[in-house]
Image: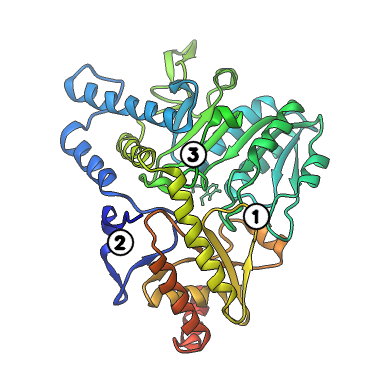
Amino acid sequence: MNLKKQFPILEQHAHGHPLVYLDNAATTQKPLPVIEAIDRFYREANANVHRASHYLSARSTHAFEEAREEVRHFLNAAGSDEIIWTRGATEALNLVAQSWGRSQLQPGDEILLSAMEHHANIVPWQLVAEQTGALIKVINVTEQGELDLNSFRELLTDKTRILAIAHVSNAIGTVNPVETLAFEAKAKGAVVLLDGAQAVSHASIDVQKLNCDFYVFSGHKVFGPTGIGVLYGKKALLEAMPPWQAGGEMIREVSFKGTTFNELPFKFEAGTPNVSGVIGLREAVRFVRALDMKQVVEHENRLRVRAEEGLKNLPGVTLVGEARHKVSVVSFVVEGIHNQDIGLLLDQQGIAVRTGHHCTMPLMEHLGLSGTVRASFSVYNTLEDVDVFLAALSRILKGELGASQAGEEAKGHS
Ligand code: PMP
């Protein structure tokens, strides 16, 4: 699988070395069709959508709604009115917390999260818990970095109103058994939200098979632009939910006596949307749908296993999170060297990784760490990328690449 040629950004050098981009869990790079679609949109079709009866507006509206249909296929949703455009996973999570949560939760109701959630799937629930008197319960994570199913079953009760959980962990790559979790949570009458931000580029998603009520993701983590994301919601739930943000597009009729709201999905899309983002996402989703996901998974697993085996052979390196079912995310710490120092030294060799807490401070605290180094691989990475990364890290550990010098630089950043 060699897709690098389709990603022009990867052709460059960084600090005099060929760029090796291993920060895909933070954001993925964009293939040419996505870049070209956005360029073409602004050259040929730019106009506001759903508003005017002119040629360009009809063209942009058509492309915009075609994109919704493309995403419906991508998630296998029952209808395109179940696909709501948001700015990203974060906004989608806030939408559910504020609209569903504020209208549904009562004092004493329980919100079930896990210890491996991204802050974006914690803080919106903390806000709504304060506003409604609901309580947050947290499912334990094992030392291996897996969800503790005993803890889940203990905490899942008749009081649980919603289970909101990551499909895949961004910090350690664990794939959670979401189908089982959703089945058991729904049997107790809870609503199920899956945070798919880290899953969508690594697996085929079928929201009907998963039987979740909400599924969220960000376009930029699946080869699309930043500033666009998706909330999938089951129609009956979305219809019963009050609007969240208010303005143009989400209304049917406005008067000072009162306002009536538009139908789905527009009820949740106030204001001029990110049209070029939607157009870019349409192309990104087409790119993914044209891939053979089985081959993608095999390729990414090969990269991950090569990285993990290489890391295990390096002195002082400890892998963090060794779940049995993982995507191509490898987190680790190095004895005696701060994760930021490792990140800086790798960067000097042209290798991009992420360091720190990865917006999962509760997980880091749970694991007794302040942060990790995270290398995350995507479809366009190669075994050679993994080898370059391992060789550079090996030289850093041998002190050949100036650990003390980078240590001084890192202090300025902390
Ligand atoms: N959830 C998870 C699991 C994530 O990895 C991220 C992004 N790191 C988010 C939510 C938030 O995504 P965004 O910042 O694109 O809204």
Q: For the residues carrying marks 1 and 2, which lies nearer the camera in this image?
A: 1
Mark 1 → mark 2, Cα distance in angstroms: 31 Å
Answer few, some or many: residues within 10 Å of disc 3's Cα (few below 14, many 20 plus, some between 14 and 19). some
In the image, taking residue 69 as reference, residue 56 lies left or right, namely left
Earlier along the polypeptide chain: callout 1 or callout 2? 2
Which sits in the foreground, 58 or 312?
312
Rendered-image quadrant of the N terminus: bottom left
The type of residue carrying mark 1 is Arg
Residue 233: x and y in percent read 54, 27
Which sits in the foreground, 353 or 132?
353
**Which secondary structure, mark 3?**
loop
- Please tell me which residue is depicted at 42% across the width and 25% down the height of the picture: 247
Rendered-image quadrant of the C terminus: bottom right
Which residue position is annotated with label 2? Answer: 10
Which residue position is annotated with label 1? Answer: 324
Which sits in the foreground, 193 or 308?
308
